[in-house]
Image (spheres, rainbow, N blue to C red):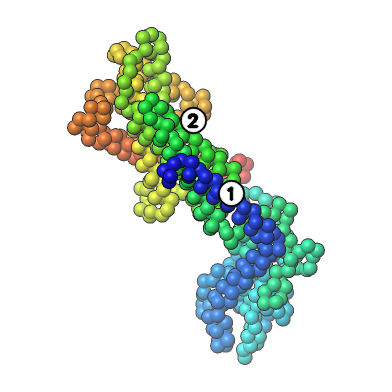
Amino acid sequence: MYKKSLFFLILATLLLVGGLLLQKISGTYYNSQAYYSQLVEENLREEIREMEYEMVPLLDSVSTTEILNFGDFNRKTKYPYFVFRNQELKVWSDYHFAPDYHLIEGNYSIKLISYNNDIFITRKWFSESKTGQIEIVSILPIYTDFAVQNKYLSNFTNEDLFNRQEVSISAKADKDAYAIEFRNTPVFWLKSLPDFSLTYSPYKTALFIIYNLAILFLIVAIALWARRRAVGKHKWVMLLATLAIWVVLKITMNVFNFPGALSGIDLFDSQFFAVSWFERSFADLLLNTTMIFLLSAIAFKKYRIVIGKAHSSSTLRMLYAVLLVFLLNLVFNYQYLQLRTIYFNSQISLDITKSLTFDSFRVMAILVFFLISLSTAMLFHILFRRLEIQAASRREKVISLIVGSVTFWLFTYLVNLPVASLVGVTMAIIIILFISKIHKSLQQLSNAITLYILFWIMIESIVVGWCIAEFENIRETNKMVRYAQNLASKNDYMAE
């Protein structure tokens, strides 16, 4: 029973429906502004507690010191602090901003202050000494609103406090606003904007697990059905089923922002990697690469051995051969385009020649390289075996190789793709395989199969190394160009 696809399909459906019901029930309250105000209040309480904990050594030093020496208070804290004595600023930890005394004066412990475009919370402590009254103030930034915004200036909202939500803050009680309190003292009043949508839920982890299990069981159901159908002549069913799984996963991830909406994993965050709708995060890139590898592995298993004859028509045979050479170039340049995408469309700088730090993104990037190389080798073998059958004579081999490669080279310009730098390498590999016929070792299961595998390992190593060298050269060139442009703009007031 457990091996039947219907069982896994029913199980996946039940999990999906249960997850949707749990999300709907919990969302009624946990997506409300009332709950959000409690969440902000808890965040504020945690931030103030952290601020107080960091200020304990400073408060002890101030209370036992008669002379305030600036060097004695060189402490690193999350939020800036300022020490006033007799209303004069004596010690500060922020070199960008220091509040005037009239902004923070008063007998209070916590207060919301608005100054120009800034809104911040001040936490104040008092201490008496022989030289006068000492006031220690620490600042918690809340919000900054710039009238003009550009790439240098942009609005700031404390994400640790507001969970990346756009809100309206007021120092006075307002209609439909919720009071945010600290130790029974109202600090400010909070009102969410009309497009408020809170994705937080205490059931986020449970929903994440439920939805992932539902997708997993759905994939198992499709795979079992495809395996039962892919018997005999129905080899294409496994490819079609894998493609269907890929489409289902992509639609789910993009339409429902899954699983990014239920997890805070950087792998699904577009700020680290984003290219297009098809690859909105590094997880999308990993998924696409994995699915292409699975399609390549299934196709390699089913179609690596070619049993057939060439077309009887020489014209059709030549057109088919030219198309196969075009596809061989496309497959081999696929790895170049993916490596180029990772280098120039993300914030993860894979400077392998400069750093040996293996964080999660680097490990994933190496996995992507590995899967791309395997997919390239398998698809190249499948297509080349068919090219060998169609281009029977030496003349047909030469013509199809030249025409197909030139056609692909022109295609890259028509669709505005990066220049096909690996066309020459692809032609060289095809010529080597035509002459050596080492690829036939897979079909004959001879001892030369080891040599064929080593051949592809060497090819992929050279290609990846060459790509990294070229990308580094392009990056260094771009840096020099930007430096020259900045230098020109500083020395020539008319420069653009």
Please tell me the numbered disc located at residue 417. 2
In the rendered view, does 206 fall on the left or right side of 137?
A: left
Residue with the mark numbered 1: 17
The residue mark sitting in front, 1 or 2, is 1
Say which quadrant the C terminus sits in: top right
In the rendered view, does 182 fall on the left or right side of 492?
A: right
Check disc 2 and give the amino acid type: Leu
In the rendered view, does 110 fall on the left or right side of 331?
A: right
Measuring from the top left, give residue 492's x and y in whole percent. 59, 44
Circle 2: element type:
loop
Quadrant in the rendering for residue 180: bottom right
Identify the residue at the far right of this view. 175
In the rendered image of this protein, does residue 383 appear above or below residue 207? above
In the rendered image of this protein, does residue 381 appear above or below residue 470? above
Measuring from the top left, give residue 432's x and y in whole percent. 27, 25
Q: Are marks 1 and 2 in contact (CB under 8 Å)?
A: no
Say which quadrant the N terminus sits in: top left
- The one of 154 and 289 positioned closer to us in this rendering: 289
